[in-house]
Amino acid sequence: LEKMPEEARRMGSLLTQAGYRFWVVGGVVRDALLERLPTDWDFSTDAPVEALIRLLSPSFRVIPVGLRHGTVHVLTAHGAMEVTSWEGNGSQAVLDDLRRRDFTVNALAVSFPDGTLLDPFGGRRDLERRRLRGVDDPLARFREDPLRVLRASRFAATLGLHATPKTLRCLRQAAPWLQETATERVREELFKLLTGPWVVEGLELARRTGVLEVVIPELLEGYRKKQNHYHAHDIYHHTLYAVHHSPARIRVRLAALLHDIAKPRVRKKIRGVFRFFGHDKENAGMAQSILERWLVPKKLAEEVCILVANHMVHGTDCWKDGAVRRLIHRVGEPLLEDLLDLMAADRMAHGTEAAAGEESVERLRQRIARILAEKPALDLSALAVDGRDVMAALGIGPGPQVGRVLKRVHRIVLEDPAMNRRDVLLAWIREKGRDVSDE
Ligand code: ATP
Ligand code: MG
């Protein structure tokens, strides 16, 4: 309770002074026991919802969000806090609340202001033993809301919990029901799973329970698909390790999850032997359709596809600076950090002489830093000439030829930054600008 925000304390006082009870419930209690920073605050009270609104309204903005369930949101500097009213006598109210929660570790409450822990299902012990157990009859609970099946994998990934045998059996049975759940809810849980520290365990639980089959069956196509001798793992496990070795940011983790997604579908004959050979374009294309299916916001989806489409660069040590500048231009400066992290994670996930590959990524990282410090002309606006110069030099009006010439000039400057001088570029345009055609 010490960590409770000031506003929550005030709510608690208003309700308890009026003779009602007030509890902190759910994930925040769990997080407090784990000494993790709480994300969102949820509360429960035995005040009828009318009394709840009447008591809190003078001090707070109260928004009735789910009056049928007796839930209101209270706006505070710490975001919207959820208060649910359970009419009933005393502790019975909070027991009714906890019974409706998904897993024992989430079915915890602390009463205000005395700080007594309410733990009717042994959630604290499960937390200590890193056990994930459904509340009451798990199968019935998963039937009520199949998202709970995915939440199980999410808690495996974020808290390092392991499902008990009975819960595991019920998860397996219930996984197909996940198809009925709204895509947005599935995506939110999936994103939390992917950024968890135990993401490999979370994805493995999702595979073993049948969640992957529903959410991303494409990933299972790589299961037990052997790769060439550079790889110690099959495509599926390589992918999981690539996610694990990426920093816990959703954009790069999505890219790691999808970086080889087309590989099991594409076999090519290389030196007489058939090998799996996902191409940048095929990987990015499949990544795009999966992200669309999950209704991922467009900008994020585009960025993930750019990462997937550009991560497979090899032999960068032999690249000329011009090639590095072209890569920077293609990917865009804000995505470079993620791209380099993805490349390094991909190499670490090989499980064989990965170190050499990692070092070359580090060298590329340093080269990119050096080249960026030289402030190269990364887009058309940084050129020493503009569209009007092109029109004047060639004696032409506005039209597609102006754009074509500018693009070509930009390519030349990326190759050789010393060319980015007005006199030099104007001379080049006068001489060759007429011959520039679509590339
Ligand atoms: P986070 O750290 O992401 O906030 P959380 O466990 O608090 O994790 P929320 O989605 O914020 O998860 O939900 C808050 C609480 O509400 C949970 O701890 C759980 O007790 C309960 N809860 C949430 N979703 C469900 C659900 N689908 N079924 C049952 N209980 C749920
Ligand atoms: Mg929460």
Image (cartoon, rainbow, N blue to C red):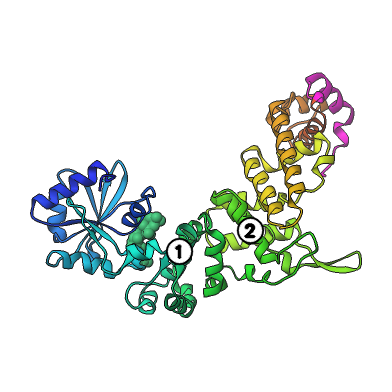
First in sequence: mark 1 vs mark 2: 1
Does 170 sit left or right of 360 as displayed? Answer: left
Placement of 438 over or under 160, stated as above or below = above
Q: Which percent across, then down, holds residue 292?
A: 57, 60
Q: Could you say whether the residue bearing mark 1 is in a helix, strand or loop?
A: loop
> Is 86 left, or right, of 160 in this rendering?
left
Q: CA distance from mark 1 to mark 2?
A: 19 Å
- Please name the residue shown 49% across and 73% down the image: 179
Q: Closer to the camera, 312 or 90?
A: 90
Residue 438 colored magenta?
A: yes
Q: Is residue 15 above or below residue 123?
A: above
Q: Quadrant of the C terminus?
A: top right
Question: In the rendered structure, which amino acid carries the disc numbered 1?
Answer: Leu
How many C-alpha atoms fall within 10 Å of the one at disc 2: few (<14), some, or many (≥20)?
many
Amino acid type at mark 2: Tyr
Question: Is 49 located above or below residue 178 in the figure?
Answer: above
Q: Position of residue 274 (x, y in %)?
A: 84, 69
Secondary structure beneath label 2 = helix
Q: Quadrant of residue 9?
A: top left
Magenta segment: 418-439
Q: Where is residue 23 shown, x and y percent of the image?
A: 21, 56
Please name the predominant secondary structure of the magenta segment in the image.
helix
Q: Of discs 1 and 2, which sits in the foreground?
A: 1
Location of residue 438 by image quarter? top right
Q: Residue at x 65, y 61 (%)?
A: 239
Pointer 1 and pointer 2: residues touching (CB < 8 Å)?
no
What residue is shown with label 1?
A: 161
Q: Nearer the viewer, residue 274 or 159?
A: 159
The x and y percentages for residue 58 are 14, 44
Q: Residue 241 — which label?
A: 2
Give ligand 1's quarter of the image: bottom left
